[in-house]
Image: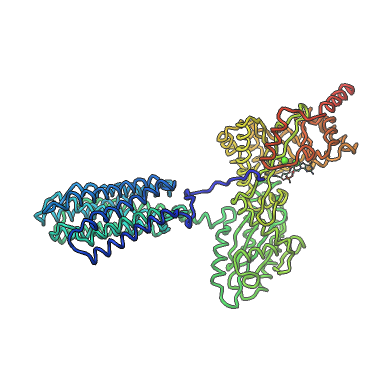
Amino acid sequence: MSGSVIPVPRAGVSAPALTPRRFVPRPVVGLLAVIVAALIVYGAWVVWGTAEHDPLRDAWLYCAIGALAAGAVGVRAVLVATDRTAMLLLSTGLFLWVGGDVYYTAVVVPIDPQPPVTIADVFYLALYPFLIASLIMMLRSRVSRPPASLWLDALLSALTVAAIAFIWVTGLLVGGDDDPAAAIVNGAYPALDLLTACMIAAILTLLNWRLERMWIMFLIAAGCLAAFDVAYFAGVLEGEMRPGLLLDFGWLLALVLLAFAAWAPPAVVSPPSIGWRGVAVPMVVISLATAVIVFGDFVQVPVSSTVLATTALIVGGGRVAVAFIAVSGDAALRRQQREDSITGLGTRRLVYLRLDDAIAELAPHRECIVLVFDLNGFREVNRSLGHAAGDELLRQVGARIAHGLGREAVVGRVAADEFVAVLTDVASRATVVARANRVIDAVSVPFRIAQTEIEIGACVGLAVCPQHAFTREGVLKAANAALARAKKTRQPVVVFNPDLDELESGTLSLSQDLRRGIRAGEIVCYFQPKLDLTDGLVHCVEVLTRWRHPREGMIFPDVFIPLAERGGFMGAFTRAVLREALSQCRRWRAAGLDVQVAVNLSVTNLVDGDMPGDIGRMLSETEVPANRLILEVTETVLTADETKARQVRGDLQAIGVEISVDDYGKGYSSLRQVRSLHASEVKLDAEFVTGVAENVEQAAIVSSTVKLAHELGLRLVAEGVETRADLAAVARLGCDEAQGYYIRRPAPEEEITKWLWQREGKPWQGLAKHRRSASEQVTAAG
Ligand code: C2E
Ligand code: CA
Ligand code: CA
């Protein structure tokens, strides 16, 4: 039995879904072991065996090991979806290389003297484009949009490598009496190796040197390939035409390393950021290019090399500019992350960083004190005077706190009206408590905002590291527990005391846990049907959320909605609920159940200017018609930042979603005020409905509310129908819809779907009778 889990989208880079430990299937482990064993046998055979050509060792065993390595990469492509195309490319490249080996041993070896360039070289060289393409593919699956700097790095590396390669090749052409084709082909190997190594370096730069094992292995394999190619090239320069057996071993080793790299478990990579390390690659490459130009002063360097190196330096200039822009953008972002835009004080992030530092560097016999401030009545100011006044108030409060605590304090705003201060290396706790008292006094002096005198109070909870806790979480939790005590007992300053109420620390840790719970998909949607009393059918279900807490069990919205509101993540929460509600609606519609879904919005959602646009987007993504979505808002919304709220409501109305006024009667607004919300229905609070059959006063309220609602063109929904008698009464009194435990308790998706199918097309028994008597009453009265 499970409700529908709300998936919260993961930001950033797509993460391979496999866990490292179980990544390599057992048969593949066997295959890799065989390859290693064969390589060891080959190596030993080379060292202790004959230096002459041995067909069993140099043809059969050699090609078999190469083919097995290429095959292992092929198996990786077949079995694992992650990086499949990349592995397919790599495997193809390796097979081509092996093909070159087969050709070499079968055709080239018997020829005497051996030609310097053969068809085998074409096969060998074919590995590189495949290897490079596969690296690019792997990079692309990890970074969605490579920044300009990467392309510049790649260009820079390529130009420099080309400049160096030209010296080599030209040197050969000038110095040697060999075949120029041989020089070019043999020079191509180390040049391509260098290019591959540069590419891997650039990739690592882009991944911010998060050394995924796979990339390290690729780097080692490429390094190995390059080292042996260079050794061979040196041999060619000396006039040696035939590679030694040790070189053969080296190449084979590189191949096997590539196979192992392919099977290294891919790690979850976090999005790249450009740090100082981003400069390392271009610096090395630019130095090399400079060296080529300087070198040209002493020995003869071909013009093409100088031109290429100069171009590389020009590109390098561009690269430095790009890096500078990235770094300055980074700095702006970092400032944004550390400075609260309203108060100019620190952000939560900054305070946490400072607290971490303070705890790490705490000297013996010294203390670090954390103060958590909370304002009383800030919400009311925000509601009655609007956000601009609220922001101004926060700014002034922040200034008084910072001033009162003195220079040494790091002060930040961590939630809507919550400030945290960290005082490090404190010698006397008493002075801090005295200062905290002074701050509270200062904050209770009235503020002047927009020609209005505003009086608000504040209280503060205080905790000490290391006395109360040794970690950041621990001290903050303790300070919050002290704050809760302060609020409860109406004391201005409370220092944490380990005996503080269990329950207080319980709800506090819960609040910290909610963010995690949302991310972990622990919030589930339950659904409760609304029964249409005119035709006895169910056309709509309300979405009610539950928190399936791993330790605390089921937690109800009355507990966690206020936590989300306080924590400032109600926007994300509601969007997640809407997304799930609309997906469910779409599934029902696809199965042939045409039901509306009603989603509860909170006060903050209704002053969130992005909400209408986001809802519109979700509707079109799920292809649910707008009139299938009802948004339930409480009438207290009427008193929130009205200009903003009106605009948001107007936008919602323009989309075509219905608005329902929830908990009507609990607050103090009149139905006429409700009408200005452009709602299409009103939900009469359960307080007036439950037990209505036995209470004449309640019946009179329901009856008159129904009449007025109908006059104003609003549907009336009775909430809290708990008994058969309640249902009969609300039907008789003319309510349009009913909702309550008697009809159906809220339940997870599967249960409700089953229930909806059972009821599909079958009107609720016995309702028509009550409706008829209601209309008779009206006729009789008329
Ligand atoms: P609400 O919108 O008034 O929802 C109706 C509440 O009354 C639900 O409680 C429901 O389980 C309960 N109820 C239904 N039938 C009966 C009945 O016959 N008798 C009684 N006594 N109660 C009945 P629940 O699910 O605990 O939700 C409580 C409140 O939490 C909701 O009140 C709603 O304001 C809020 N809430 C729930 N889910 C969300 C959400 O996703 N977003 C927001 N913003 N608020 C939510
Ligand atoms: Ca509701
Ligand atoms: Ca309600």
Query: x and y percent of residue 389 in the render?
Result: 65, 49
Whether residue 242 can be seen here: yes
Quadrant of ligand 3 in image:
top right
- Quadrant containing the N terminus is top right
Whether residue 707 can be seen here: no
Q: Which residue lies furthest to the left in this view?
A: 177
Q: Nearer the viewer, residue 50 or 734?
A: 50
- Quadrant containing the C terminus is top right
Query: x and y percent of residue 480 in the render?
Result: 67, 62
User: Does 172 sit above or below residue 581?
Assistant: below
Q: Nearer the viewer, residue 299 or 621?
A: 621
Query: x and y percent of residue 126 in the render?
Result: 26, 47
Tell me the residue at 46%/52% (across/down).
271
Query: x and y percent of residue 658 in the render?
Result: 67, 33
Q: In this view, does 151 lie to the left or right of 172?
A: right
Q: In this view, does 506 lie to the left or right of 205?
A: right
Tell me the residue at 58%/58% (across/down).
348
Q: Which of 475 and 42 is in front in this view?
A: 42
Quadrant of res 40:
bottom left
Q: Is residue 724 left or right of residue 638?
A: right
Tell me the residue at 79%/36% (across/down).
718
Quadrant of res 430:
bottom right
User: Does 568 sit above or below residue 468?
Assistant: above
Q: Nearer the viewer, residue 581 or 214?
A: 214
